[in-house]
Amino acid sequence: MEQDRLIFKIFITAILVGFVEAFLIYSRMFLSFTLYTVQDFTIYHFIISLITFIINPIMVLIGFYYLGRKFDLKSNLKPAIIRLLIGAYLGQFFGITILQLVGICFIKGFNFYWISYLSSILSVLFLRIFFPAFTALAISYLRNNRKETDEA
């Protein structure tokens, strides 16, 4: 029962992280409509790049490491992998879709690029979340097994 809750938490966390990452990455497409000076664009682009390149993987590692402390990865490997992939992909899907809807509704002169949207939805960017998340779960599992082996 506890393992099922942990798998569900992994799924929800993957959705949330995927949503935030997609929202941050794809919000750059609105920069030309909202930022009027090169300096504003540069500052915003730098901040978003820093968050997505450095801080996001670290937060993913920490979050999934703590989720994996009581998680038996060996017996739940396939369900964990499937839920990580689906959760990350759904998060990306919702993040990209909401940004496109915001663009349609609020930005005058914004052209809805269907090809760009579809390629974004079908892209493999969700793997940026999957690998750090799975690595954190694996590290946590290995550490817990090593502690149990040392205690025995």
Image (cartoon, rainbow, N blue to C red):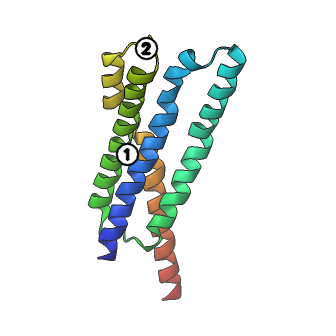
Relative placement, left or right, of 85 versus 28 is left
- Give the foreground label among 2 and 1: 2
Mark 2 crowdedness (10 Å alpha carbons): few <14, some 14-19, many ≥20: some
Q: Which amino acid type is shown beneath numbered disc 1? A: Ala
Could you say where residue 119 lies in the image, as x and y percent from the top left?
A: 33, 23
In front here: 6 or 31? 31
Task: Return the residue nearer the eye: 87 or 110.
Answer: 110
Compared across the picture, whether 13 is left or right of 115 comes to right
Which residue occupies the foreground of this view, 149 or 29?
A: 29
Cα distance, mark 2 to mark 1? Answer: 27 Å
- What is the secondary structure assignment of the residue under circle 1? helix
Which residue is located at x 42 percent, y 27 percent? Answer: 102
Which quarter of the rendering shows the N terminus? bottom left
Q: Using the image, determine if residue 121 lies above or below residue 85.
A: above
Residue 100 horizontal/vertical position (percent): 38, 26
For numbered disc 2, what is the local secondary structure? loop
Say the numbered circle drawn on residue 88: 1
Q: Give the residue displayed 38% in from the left and 62% down from the top.
A: 9
How many other residues sit within 10 Å of disc 1, few (<14), some (14-19) or many (≥20)? many
Give percent across and percent down for residue 69. Answer: 47, 71
- Residue 115 image position (x, y, % from top left): 31, 17
Q: Which residue bears the numbered disc 2?
A: 110
Name the residue rendered at 45%, 36% in the picture.
22
Looking at the image, residue 37 sits to the left or right of residue 20; the answer is right
Q: Is residue 82 above or below residue 120?
A: below
Task: Examine the image and state in which quarter residue 109 appears.
Answer: top left
